[in-house]
Amino acid sequence: MEENEIYLSVISPIHNEEAHVVELYFRLSKALAQLDKPYEIIFVDDGSTDRTYALIKDLKLRDEKIKIIRFIRNFGQPLAVTAGFNQAKGKVIVSIEGSLKSPPEEIPHLLAELDKGYDVVIGSTSIHHVSLIYRPLIRLINWFVSKLTGITIQDYDCLLMAYKRGAVKMILQCRERSPFIRALVSWLGLKTSEIIIDMNKTHSSTKTVFDLLKTDFELITSFSVLPIRFLSSIGIFMGSLAVILGILWLIQSYILGISNMVMLAFLSITFGIQLYGLAFLSKYVAKIYLQIQGRPYYIIDEVIE
């Protein structure tokens, strides 16, 4: 199959998905056959240690439309998608989870939306899939993150997306380790549309509020320096105030009569803020460290076309 014959490339990063990969293939094949356009399916084995790789090799023997990329170890889903981008030959590229979280049957809906003139179409799961207890918290966190980063996306976790080739070329020019392809698309200013998809009812999410906060912490430190600026200003203010109150503490018996408990409470608050600031600074330093090492983002062990 020549490169100019392929209309659609579907990229699926997989890591220890022996329970899902065969079903994923058959459902993908059925959905893509209905499009009546040439396509390829790119499985990126992200360092699986179970039978996943053996299963996709067996599938490759029966279907020449399959391409396999195998990493030497686990590098993470975003880099697996990036490797697929570099190998994809289609005019349109779609990414989808190997876990069957997003139904392959939704792909035609994304392509129909893409034909309306968008560069990227983002699939999002409805907040109604989330417990009623967590919905207000999720809305609040998403609002806060959007204010800090300038990026407004409902669902950062769903991988189902459709891209025009020009958009993928722009994404590949961004040489960074950000795990948020969706946020990167927003940062690039590409013309995007976000549609609600029906999340696979057989997929059970184990994410907690802690996981959500961890994800947002990663997102903020990847796309905004406002926390550093804010904490720097707070640090200067609190440090200056601590020095002033420290001096007042020494002369309290003569003038102010401030109790020791008030001073200890203030020092505890100051110490807490410093720890939060240290957490943010450590994250930024770690990102800089990884970036300047110059190591390849991923290493491919084998490509089977």
Image: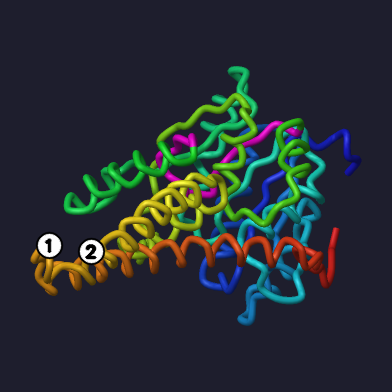
Q: Which mark is residue 31?
A: none
127 falls in the magenta region: no
Where the N terminus falls, by quadrant? top right
* Residue type, label 2: Leu
Q: Residue furthest right?
A: 2
State yes or no: residue 162 in magenta: yes
Question: Are discs 2 and 1 less than 8 Å apart at CB?
Answer: yes
Q: Does residue 21 appear in this view?
A: yes
Residue 12 location (% of width, % of height): 64, 55
SS for tag 1? loop
Q: Quadrant of residue 92?
A: top right
Say which amino acid is labelled 1.
Ile
Report whether 294 appears left or right of 230: right
Can residue 197 be seen by looking at this rendering?
no
Which mark is drawn over residue 248?
2
Residue 254, above or below 150 = below
Give the Cα distance between marks 2 and 1.
Answer: 9 Å
For the residue pair 80 and 212, the one nearer the viewer reads as 212
Q: Which residues are magenta?
A: 150-165
Q: Residue furthest top?
A: 116
Q: Position of residue 178 (x, y in %)?
A: 62, 53
Q: Name the residue nearer the viewer: 261 or 161.
A: 261
Q: Residue at x 51, y 27 (%)?
A: 193
Q: Is residue 269 left or right of residue 154?
A: left
Numbered badge on residue 255 = 1
As drawn, 213 above or below 267:
above
Q: Earlier in the sequence, mark 2 or mark 1?
A: 2
Q: In the image, what residue occupies the spot 67% across and 46% down?
A: 10
Residue 242 in the image: state x and y as whole percent: 31, 62
